[in-house]
Image (tube, grey):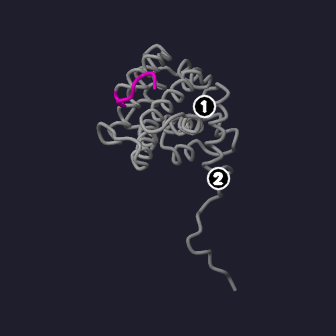
């Protein structure tokens, strides 16, 4: 008597590593200032490059996920350390976050190594980093609005988009990192409607 194959079973052998394993390996490379090399990661984990591309779409999409993963703790730390409430808390959060980016060795190394690709990955609305960053920043604004502590001059999503675009303009240039955080704080204060010294 023969047994029938399990319904819905996948053909072929399972991958040697998971999507999360690939993301962890790529994140480790990024944090150490190393280039994210899909072929090297595939060989290291024993998974086909085509599988990695099926999971992430492209090398740039993989890197966008890695850079956002590295940014999330910076966002959380900036928010946790912020003083004040309402617009003042938002300004302090964004200022702390911008200074963290300006001082992040892995981000500096990435922008230096892959200047054109790095700027495209970080700033492209069609990528996966920029839209997620806008969502996070808009979410912080919405939290203050829901708490009744801030009345934004425009919709939180639009304000979040503007804050992210400003940060991109003042932190990055076509030749690398600018890190112009003091002027960035002043412009963000004006947009948020907060006195710069707040």
Q: Which quadrant of the figure has residue 96?
A: top right
Q: Which quadrant of the figure has residue 37?
A: top right
The residue depicted at 59 percent of the width and 35 percent of the height is 81
Q: Pick out the residue farthest to the bottom.
A: 1
Seen from the viewer's position, the closer of residues 157 and 51 is 157
Seen from the viewer's position, the closer of residues 110 and 49 is 110
Indicate left or right for 189 with 2 as reference. Answer: left
The residue depicted at 55 percent of the width and 44 percent of the height is 50
Seen from the viewer's position, the closer of residues 94 and 130 is 94
Counting the numbered discs, the total is 2
Magenta residues span 191-198
Mark 1–mark 2 Cα distance, whole angstroms, equals 19 Å
Please provide percent x and percent y for residue 67: 55, 34
Secondary structure mainly formed by the magenta segment? loop
Please provide percent x and percent y for residue 21: 66, 46
Classed neighbour count for the residue bearing mark 2: other residues with Cα under 10 Å, few (<14), some (14–19), many (≥20): few
Dot label at residue 127 = none
Q: Is residue 140 magenta?
A: no
Indicate left or right for 126 with 82 as reference. Answer: left
Label 2 element class: loop
Tag 1 residue:
37
Label 1 element class: loop
Q: Is residue 192 magenta?
A: yes
Seen from the viewer's position, the closer of residues 19 and 185 is 185
Tag 2 residue:
15
């Amino acid at each position: 008597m023969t047994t029938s194959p399990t319904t819905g079973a996948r053909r072929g052998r399972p991958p040697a590593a998971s999507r999360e394993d690939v993301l962890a390996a790529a994140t480790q490379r990024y944090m150490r200032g190393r280039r994210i090399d899909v072929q090297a990661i595939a060989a290291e984990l024993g998974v086909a490059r085509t599988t990695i591309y099926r999971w992430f779409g492209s090398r740039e999409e993989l890197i966008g996920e890695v850079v956002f993963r590295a940014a999330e703790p910076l966002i959380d730390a900036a928010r946790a350390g912020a003083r004040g409430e309402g617009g003042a808390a938002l300004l302090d959060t964004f200022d702390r976050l911008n200074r963290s980016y300006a001082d992040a060795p892995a981000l500096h190394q990435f922008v230096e190594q892959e200047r054109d690709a790095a700027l495209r990955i970080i700033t492209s609305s069609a990528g996966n980093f920029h839209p997620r960053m806008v969502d996070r920043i808009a979410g912080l604004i919405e939290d203050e609005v829901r708490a009744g502590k801030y009345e934004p001059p425009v919709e939180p999503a639009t304000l979040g988009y503007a804050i992210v675009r400003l940060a991109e303009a003042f932190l990055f240039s076509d030749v690398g990192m600018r890190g112009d955080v003091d002027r960035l704080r002043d412009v963000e204060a004006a947009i948020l409607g907060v006195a710069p010294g707040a």
